[in-house]
Amino acid sequence: MEQMLHYVWKHRIFPLQKLVTVDGRELEVLHPGIQNRDAGPDFTGAKVVIDGVVWVGNVEIHERTSDWFRHHHDEDERYDNIILHVAGIVDCDLHYRMGRGDTKVPQLELKVPEYVMANYDDLLRADHEPRCADIIPSFSSISLHSWMAALEVERLQMRTEQIEERRRMLNLNWEDTLFVTIARSFGFGHNGDVFERWAHSIPMGAAAKHRDSLFQIEALFFGQAGLLESTECRGGNAEESEDPYFRQLQTEYRFLRQKFSLTPINGAEWKLLRMRPQQFPHIKIAQLAVMYCEQKVNLSALVNADDIQAMMQMLTTRVSDYWRTHYTFRKEHAQASSKALSAGAKRLVLLNCVAPMLFAYGRYKGDEAMCERALMIWEQLPAEDNRVIRHFVAAGIVPECAADTQALMQLNANYCERHDCLRCRMGEEFVRRTPGFLREER
């Protein structure tokens, strides 16, 4: 209910009669203020007229006035400059905390219009995706493009915050952060979380000492992945014990584990079911091992890459001879292959790793041109195709590039799935339509 009051106040969906405070003073809202989603009053910089006197300051909104005390605002100095308190039900008086004697805080009892509540209920009860599909065709092109652009930047900012959090965990080391971010992108959704935990488990300083030996890096990487500890499941079987390369890696990893006091992750966490063999974690780890040893992907190379083709070339990798004929530690398959990253896989790494890393590093360096390059990567990559995107396409939003599909993924994850329709511009438009709009359109 409080969220609906925020919405009604923000869009000034007020009753037709004059507004009055609970103590009978005439009220006019010149500007509702800017909604504050951080700590502190709900709206800042509001401008209202109470009995002919103009007030500029903050507005706080609650479902009930008594929530003010339940939230301990009476003990918080940030609420000392409230010019108006808005509540669905005014059930008590409020007084300023200090310095104003026994002065009451002006209060407005605000009701949510029935048609607004009805539209909102319709939206939440909708059983199709997206819930606002009925209104999307009537949403103006300018408004849609504006909202998509905002979602695109929001998506990159969210990824930037994730990268900055990784960097804090990695002692502010950008190169280690890049490795962990690339590793996560190699999970391609199915194993992303596991790949990130695996990458965090690898002491990069120790790995650097053995970078000239692909065999030792594979032993370190597969060992830390928990894939050398058992001859059962996890993509392997009893045949592993008869596999000379598997035994060699086990022996080398035991040495490295003791040398660097290592603790592997749980190998049972890796997902292999309903995955193509090319996507098995074994192959991705083998690719990352070669990429790490060849030092082809580093922050300097990404920053200096001229265009997407140069970045795609950097992601051209291979696997060691053993993995050319294997997908797991078991019987080799008949035909050898390089098992290089496909063009589609490279595009996903550019989308999910390279662009966000450039944006985050550009923000860190204060380099606007680098941030623009990150945005351009998304704009130059083709639109993605998945279940979520297809729902939006069916509703009338046809993405032209990866920037559009990333915006739609952000919309779905941060608004649709959370039922946070009142923060979505399309949801806002849906809710404030006049009574009968949806029925008339049908």
Image: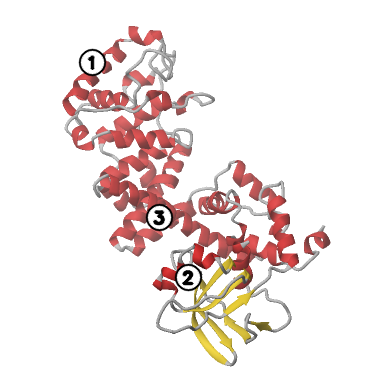
Give the mark, 3 or 1, whose residue is nearer the N terminus: 1
Secondary structure beneath label 3: helix
Q: Residues within 10 Å of mark 3 (few under 14, many from 20)?
A: many
Q: Residues within 10 Å of mark 2 (few under 14, many from 20)?
A: many
Front disc: 1 or 2: 2
Front disc: 3 or 1: 1
Query: What amino acid is at disc 2?
Result: Pro
* Whole-number angstrom distance, CA of label 2 to CA of label 3: 35 Å
Q: Give the residue at mark 3.
A: 374
Measured along the vertical axis of the image, is residue 438 above or below residue 237? below
Q: Give the residue at mark 2.
A: 41
Q: Give the residue at mark 1.
A: 251
In which quarter of the view is residue 372 placed?
bottom left
Q: Residue at x 61, y 61 (%)?
A: 422
Residue 218 located left or right of residue 407: left
Give the mark, 1 or 2, whose residue is nearer the N terminus: 2
Q: Residue 194's spot in the image, x, y percent? A: 40, 33
Query: What amino acid is at disc 1?
Result: Thr
Quadrant where the C terminus lies? bottom right
Q: Extreme bottom residue here?
A: 52
* Whole-number angstrom distance, CA of label 1 to CA of label 2: 61 Å
Residue 130 located left or right of residue 211: right
